[in-house]
Amino acid sequence: MAQLPLSPRILLTIPTANQDTPVDPDQGYVNYFDVLDVGESAKPGEVRKAYRQKMKNLINDVRRVELTAELRSRYFLDMAKLNAALFILRDTSERDAYWIERSALIALEEQWRKVEKESRDDAETIAREYDRRVRGWLSKYLEDMMLAAGRDKECMEASQWDRAHERHATRTLREFRHKQYRSILERLPFVDVTTPVIDWDERRQTIASIVSSVD
């Protein structure tokens, strides 16, 4: 599974405007039901029908324009989202696992916001757990599943996705994942890193003491 680079050490700070911002479930946590415009109770047949229509429309739209580098990246991302949506939602167990993990992550973010106002220690514990889980979720559902869907026979036939698409899309998907991660971080109640406080006089005295003892 692809992994995000290590994030900065999470440190809580005083309340900011971001802490009182309500959690937008679609900000960072991609909703694959919305990608296909189907309800959460949609049957596999309905999922497939919506997918085929949207994929057909996307391919037709692409054929009408001259692809620039930016449009090509957007095309790869939209296609990858549609493929992942079908790949996940057509299978009941895969769909349930995705939705449960997504809902749990949103709930954990809400818990962090509430606890932060009451207990710094508890908030730090939740913050670290949240960071670990959100990074894993984004890696799984915003990159790994998209790439796996592109190798699925049904998706390949409908989207005309092939290995060349995957090579070109890999960077786009990674950038999208990082963008979603950053959008989540920007609204959460912490700062990245605090500047270390160094007592240079004390450090010079320590070094001088070590040198004199060697002499």
Image (cartoon, grey):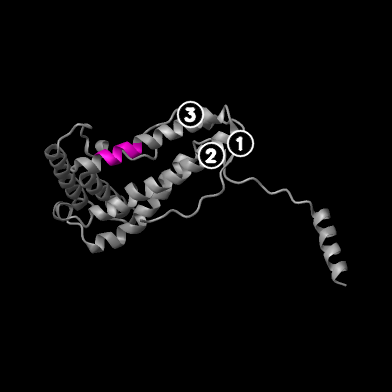
Q: Is residue 168 magenta?
A: no
How far, Cα to Cα, is label 2 from label 1? 14 Å
Closer to us: 60 or 208: 208
Rendered-image quadrant of the N terminus = bottom left
For label 3, the crowd category at 10 Å Cα-Cα, with few meaning under 14, some 14 to 19 and many 20 or more, is few
Rendered image quadrant of residue 96: top left
**Residue at image coords 19%, 43%:** 91
Along the polypeptide, which appears first: circle 3 or circle 1? 1
Mark 2 sits on what residue? 125
**Residue at image coords 29%, 51%:** 145
Closer to us: 159 or 201: 201
Label 3 with label 1: CB-CB less than 8 Å: no
Residue 9 locus on image (x, y percent): 57, 47
Query: What segment carries the magenta color?
Result: 96-102
Q: Amino acid at mark 1?
A: Thr
Mark 3 sits on what residue? 21
Q: What secondary structure do most residues of the magenta stretch adopt?
A: helix
How far, Cα to Cα, is label 2 from label 3? 21 Å
Image position of 113 (left or right of 144): right
Q: Secondary structure at mark 1?
A: loop
Q: Is residue 100 magenta?
A: yes
